[in-house]
Image (cartoon, coloured by chain):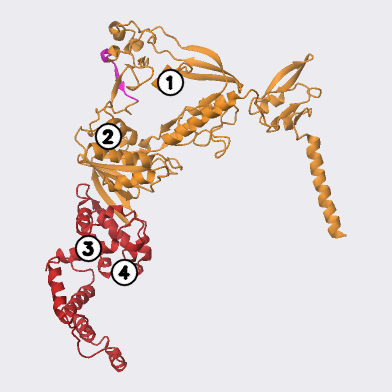
């Protein structure tokens, strides 16, 4: 990320969102809304003095609620750019009108409470959408005490706990009472492969990251013992199966095939009720910490963007590619590519592959002097067009525009946007629009020719 | 209900590893051993479940399982295991542990037959079939169970009335002496 921020041909727009998209491949007009940072980026040196002095504390989003952050903060230690941002919702100055502690202590005079959001429109040739994913809310699982017991956490929260810069400074202590942790139980498929409470799909990454965390725990804290409850182990990647076996054989991680049914409080410990379906017996065990592998879900905000960009999405909110096997990084709108977990849960290697593919596709698109389009396009006969513009309303790709020819208003098809669906052709009352190669006359001729053939055959049989 | 204790969970597995040089952790519970086991269809437990008991430190379950004693040591399981777990050897070690730790074999008959069998070998260097059958049936309180077969078997020369001792009985006894070092009691 740091590298990309220094690249001469990359402009990183942080705190910005896409407000509107117009145009078509090679000619997108994108309206960008940049939210105020309240810190002057060119003056700030990133010293962090403001962060240490800020009196307002809020639960940290990066630490998944395990730690606190200030109202002026950097989201995480390697954040790019290395400039803090003021969270206006929690900043005492923005709430009560006085404080300005950060301004007082800033040696560079970079704090600027007067910043306003800016909106600008720029031209772009192509768009790559990588909106990522979100995590399933585990509190739907009351039987696991999720949200009730502090020591029932998610995989991402454990990841934060293992980070030396994280909320516990890399120490493995219970979130409830700060005591040491010996026994850890991992529960796989929380919110995934569950049609009743969660998502029916497999979240794909959990098997591997759980095994990784169990290995890490054993490496850093050899006195701990991890037990993993699973339905199946889905380790389908290069060296993945070997990785799982290594966790079992070299790190003594116990795998129990069966879902956990209930987690209870027992004194200051947790009591996990599960089943070992390989033995056909129910299992009960004590744990200091329970880690739930919550499912990857679509970013809830991604649907808004999808509507602006005309990208279809499925029932879960994941973006739909043109073809899941042959065109996995292309959206149905030409010049808009999709990559990463916005299409479906995927791990880092898959995301990197998809990102690289989308970048290569974009380069290929720009390298050509001319665009080749499918010959199956809508074509307006301007002599017949009466200018009712019913076609504009039915076009899902916004490929029809109003045009004036010889003083008359007529419809005009933008060839790069048209996908040849034929909606306009069937809507046009004047019969002015045809899909090239599929004129009404041609289709009728084909139909009657096929009937003639059938009649001939029947006559032949009868005769 | 099984109680899995995280702190003890590796104990029994490590003991088996020590005694047999077989790492039961390697077992992936695919069930190929059970599918090929000639005695498993008649048993309540399958060989892969015995491996699972060891993986989860369920020593009591493993050592009281009749499967351990019914195992015919045909070694089909070990030959076919995709992970190279020598299941037959583990079964052998389990039988040894049963005796060492005073667990009675899962079935009374097994124990009775086992001890009579070895008494015979010790005495004659081979099996004295008539003697073994009579002794076993007496012990099982079914003295006349096989009596109907007796006349036919004698007539056809399938069973001899007197025991035959092998020539070099000394080396057999030596074998027993040597193995005593491994099996207590």
Decide which of A207, B87 is in the foreground and name it: B87
Label 3 to label 4: alpha-carbon separation: 16 Å
- Disc 2, SS: loop
The magenta segment is: A52-61
Chain for mark 4? Answer: B
Q: Which chain is orange?
A: A
* Labelled pair 3, 2 in contact (Cβ < 8 Å): no
Q: Is residue B42 visible?
A: yes
* Labelled pair 3, 4 in contact (Cβ < 8 Å): no
Give the mark nearer the N terminus: 3 vs 4.
4
Label 1 to label 2: alpha-carbon separation: 39 Å
Left or right of A83 on screen, residue A326: right
Q: Are marks 4 and 1 on the same chain?
A: no
Q: Are marks 3 and 1 on the same chain?
A: no
Q: Which chain is red?
A: B
- Disc 1, SS: helix
Q: Residues within 10 Å of mark 2 (few under 14, many from 20)?
A: some
Chain for mark 1? Answer: A
Chain for mark 2? Answer: A
Relative to B55, residue A47 above or below: above
Count of numbered tags: 4
User: Which of the two marks, 3 or 2, is nearer to us in this view?
Assistant: 3
Q: Give the labeled residue for mark 4.
A: B74
Q: Give the labeled residue for mark 3.
A: B94
x and y, in percent, of residue A226 in the image:
26, 43
x and y, in percent, of residue A354 in the image:
49, 33
User: Which of the two marks, 3 or 4, is nearer to us in this view?
Assistant: 4
């Amino acid at each position: 990320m740091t590298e990309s921020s220094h690249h001469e041909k990359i402009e990183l727009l942080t705190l910005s969102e896409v407000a509107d998209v117009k145009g078509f491949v090679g000619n997108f007009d994108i309206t960008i809304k940049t939210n105020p940072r309240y810190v002057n980026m060119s003056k700030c040196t990133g010293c962090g003095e403001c962060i240490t002095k800020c009196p307002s504390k809020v639960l940290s989003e990066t630490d998944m609620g395990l730690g606190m952050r200030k109202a002026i903060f950097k989201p995480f230690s390697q954040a790019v750019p290395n400039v803090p941002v003021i969270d206006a919702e929690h900043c005492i100055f923005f709430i009560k009108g006085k404080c300005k502690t950060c301004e007082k202590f800033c040696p560079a005079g970079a704090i600027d409470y007067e910043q306003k959001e800016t909106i600008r429109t720029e031209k772009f040739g192509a768009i790559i959408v990588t909106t990522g994913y979100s995590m399933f809310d585990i509190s739907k699982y009351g039987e696991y005490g999720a949200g009730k017991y502090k020591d029932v956490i998610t995989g991402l929260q454990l990841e934060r706990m293992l980070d030396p810069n994280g909320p516990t400074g890399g120490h493995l202590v219970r979130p409830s009472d700060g005591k040491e942790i010996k026994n850890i139980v991992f529960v796989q498929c929380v919110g995934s492969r569950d049609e009743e409470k969660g998502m029916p799909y497999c979240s794909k990454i959990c098997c591997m990251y759980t095994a990784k965390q169990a290995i890490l725990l054993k490496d850093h804290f050899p006195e701990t013992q991890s037990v993993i409850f699973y339905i199946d182990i889905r380790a389908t990647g290069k060296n993945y199966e070997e990785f799982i076996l290594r966790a079992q054989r070299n790190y003594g991680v116990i795998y129990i095939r069966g879902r956990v049914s209930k987690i209870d409080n027992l004194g200051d410990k947790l009591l996990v009720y599960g089943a070992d379906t390989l033995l056909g017996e129910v299992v009960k065990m004590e744990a200091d910490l329970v880690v739930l592998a919550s499912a990857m879900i679509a970013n809830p905000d991604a649907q808004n963007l999808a509507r602006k960009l005309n990208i279809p999405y499925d029932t879960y909110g994941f973006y739909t590619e043109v073809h899941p096997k042959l065109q996995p990084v292309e959206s149905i709108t030409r010049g808009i590519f999709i990559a990463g977990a916005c299409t479906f849960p995927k791990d880092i290697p898959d995301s990197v592959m998809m990102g690289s593919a989308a970048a290569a596709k974009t380069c290929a698109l720009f390298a050509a002097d001319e665009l080749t389009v499918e010959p199956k396009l809508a074509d307006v006969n301007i002599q017949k067009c009466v200018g009712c513009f019913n076609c504009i309303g039915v076009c899902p790709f916004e490929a029809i525009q109003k045009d004036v020819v010889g003083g008359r208003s007529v419809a005009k098809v933008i060839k790069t946007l048209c996908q040849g669906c034929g909606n306009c052709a069937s809507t046009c009352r004047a019969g002015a629009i045809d899909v090239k190669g599929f004129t009404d006359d041609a289709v009728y001729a084909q139909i009657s020719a096929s009937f003639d053939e059938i009649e001939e055959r029947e006559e032949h049989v009868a005769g | 209900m099984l109680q899995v204790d995280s702190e003890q969970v590796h104990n029994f597995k490590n003991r088996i590893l020590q005694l047999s040089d077989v790492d039961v952790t390697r077992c992936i519970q695919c069930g190929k051993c059970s599918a090929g086991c000639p005695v498993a269809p008649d048993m309540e437990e399958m060989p892969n479940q015995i491996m699972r008991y060891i993986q989860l430190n369920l020593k009591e379950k493993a050592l009281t399982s009749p499967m351990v004693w019914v195992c015919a040591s045909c070694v089909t399981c070990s030959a076919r295991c995709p992970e190279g777990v020598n299941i037959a050897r583990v079964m052998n070690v389990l039988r040894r542990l049963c005796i060492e730790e005073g667990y009675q074999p899962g079935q009374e008959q097994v124990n009775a037959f086992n001890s009579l069998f070895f008494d015979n070998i010790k005495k004659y260097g081979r099996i004295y079939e008539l003697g073994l059958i009579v002794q076993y049936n007496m012990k099982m309180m079914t003295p006349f169970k096989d009596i109907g077969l007796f006349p036919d078997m004698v007539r056809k020369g399938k069973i001899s009335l007197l025991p035959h001792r092998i020539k070099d009985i000394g080396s057999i006894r030596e074998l027993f002496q040597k193995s005593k070092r491994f099996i207590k009691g």
